Every structure is written in structure tokens, then in C-alpha cells.
Amino acid sequence: MLASFRAELLKIRKRPATWVLALVWFVLLVLFGYVFTYTFAANPPDPPKDQPAAVQQQQEAINKQLLDSLLPENMLKTLFANGTFNLGAAIVLILGAMAAGSEYGWTTLKTSLTQRPGRFGFLSGKALAVGVFIVLFVLLGLAAGAASSYDVAYLEDATVKWPPLEEMARAVGVGVLTFGAWGFLGFALAMLFRGTALAIGLGLAWALAVENTIALLPIDSDWWKGFRRLTLGENTASLGSIFGDPNPSFGIPAPLVEPERAAITLGIYVAAFVALSLFLLLRRDVT
């Protein structure tokens, strides 16, 4: 397993697509998490001349609230509670699918298994390597948030006050659970469909279209809410609420799941996706 793990680390690290995904993740977080919000809040459009003073004061208060949310002390709430970190779900889903499915496209799976790692060791090493890169992507996201929030504090001449160290450690755990669930979803889909194209296509369709539709459908019933509590999107959003309630200015629905339950659910998803991948590899022909 260790040999397979080292080989997979080298393989993922040497792939240009890995670094392209990392760059896309960094740019997405900076732009949508900070640049666009700061540009809107710091340079609001001129109000209409006939706008009531009360409305103008309310808009100024909202802009002030948005600016405050971008400061370092509120970094974790901006990244997780406001859903910014969930932008990386599609990125790590692609990463997991590429790591698991490329062997089929390259027709190297049979060759790899003849080098004596065994199917269990082969898949375990591959999954561990994906987990390492998931952690690295989480750290990259936190670094991007820290750099962006520091820049906002510098531009606003505000005091730089970072979240406590234990909160930062908790943020790493929340990020790993969030990215782990989506990354190993792509991993399992690639093993199921024996390739990357269909796995990435269906995974992105679920992550970007189906999950968002489920969250926004105005169905007020207990069975529907119970179904939503089981979805990946709802649990990743609810887990982020451990750092505070989402900013009402972003129109994010209130979470349905307690953060502790969401963490357990996402952990079960990770274990289930890895177990499914192992079952498929053990039970099916590799060609």
C-alpha cells in the first residue's frame, strides 16, 4: 500500500490538471469570496435623487456589514457560513474523479495491479493520496482567504485580528470533511463508470444543478425537509454554520441540520464512497 501511495502522490503531483484545478480554486475563492463583494460594498452606485433617506441609510448599513464580514476576524464565517468554501466542491470532485478514473482511460490498471500491490492496497494507496491533496486544497483555500482578508483590512485601514488558533484548526477539519465528501463522490463515480468523463459530467450536474434545485424548491413538508437533510449540499452548508449564521445579504437559506450531525453525515458519506469504490474494484473485472 505504501508503494502505491507514493506512486499515486507522484502521479497526481506531476499532472498539470492538478495545478490547474488548484489555480482555479484559488481564483474562484478570491474573486467570489472577496473581490466582487468588496468592490460592490466599497464602491456602491450613486443612489437615486428621490431615494428616501431611510432607504439610503439602510443600504449604507448593509455595505458596512459586508465590509466588516471581509475582515480577518470574520474570515471563517465568510469562507464557511456564507458558502464561499463550497465553491471548491466541484473542483475536488474533478480531482477525485481524475485520480480514480484515469487508469481506465490510460489502460494502465491491469499493469498497475501486476506490480504486486493487490487490489486492496492499490485502491487504499490511491484513496490516501487523494486525501492528502484534499487537505492541501483546504489549506490553499484558507491561505487564499487569509491573504484576501488581510488585503481588505489594509485597504480599509482596519485592525488585523485573526480568529483563535483552535478555530483555525476546526476550520481545517470542516474543510477536510466538506472536500472529502465531494472528492470521494467523484472518486466513487469514476470507479463505477470506469472512466473520468461520465463521472465528472454526472458529478458536476448533481453538484451544480440538482443540489441547488433541491435547496431552492419551495416545498414545505416534513418528508421533503427530511430528504434535504440527507443531501451532500445541505450537510456541507449546515456544517459551515458552525462558525456563525450566514449573512442575510447573500440570501442563503437557513441550515436544516445541526453542525455536529452534519459532520457525522459527511464522515459516513466519505466512508461509504471509499467502501463502494473498493467493492467495485474487488468484485469486477479490471478490463
Image: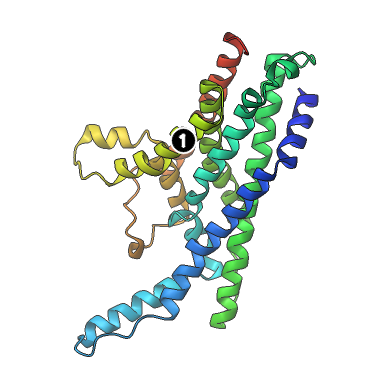
Residue 72 is at least partly visible in this image = yes
Of all residues shown, which one is farthest toward the bottom?
Answer: 49
- Identify the residue at horizontal 62%, vertical 23% (top origin): 104
Mark 1 highlights which residue?
A: 201
| Quadrant showing the C terminus | top right
Q: Is residue 76 above or below residue 61?
A: above
| Quadrant showing the N terminus | top right
**Left or right of residue 141: residue 70:** left
Type of the residue with mark 1: Gly
Q: Mark 1 falls on what kind of element?
A: helix
Between 62 and 287, the one nearer to me in the picture: 287
Between 160 and 36, the one nearer to me in the picture: 36
- Identify the residue at horizontal 80%, vertical 25% (top origin): 3
Report the colour scheme: rainbow
**Left or right of residue 217: residue 282:** right
* Mark 1 neighbour density, 10 Å: few (under 14) some (14–19) many (20 or more): few
> Where residue 103 sits in the image (x, y, percent)?
66, 25
Q: Is residue 24 above or below residue 73?
A: above
Residue 164 is at least partly visible in this image = no
Q: Is residue 201 above or below residue 168?
A: above
Q: Quadrant of residue 286?
A: top right
Q: Quadrant of residue 226?
A: top left
- Identify the residue at horizontal 39%, vertical 58% (top origin): 246
Between 163 and 91, the one nearer to me in the picture: 91
> Where residue 165 sits in the image (x, y, percent)?
64, 58
> Where residue 216 sits in the image (x, y, percent)?
28, 47
Of all residues shown, which one is farthest toward the front?
Answer: 106
> Where residue 252 sits in the image (x, y, percent)?
34, 55
Q: Quadrant of residue 113?
A: top right
Q: How many marks?
A: 1
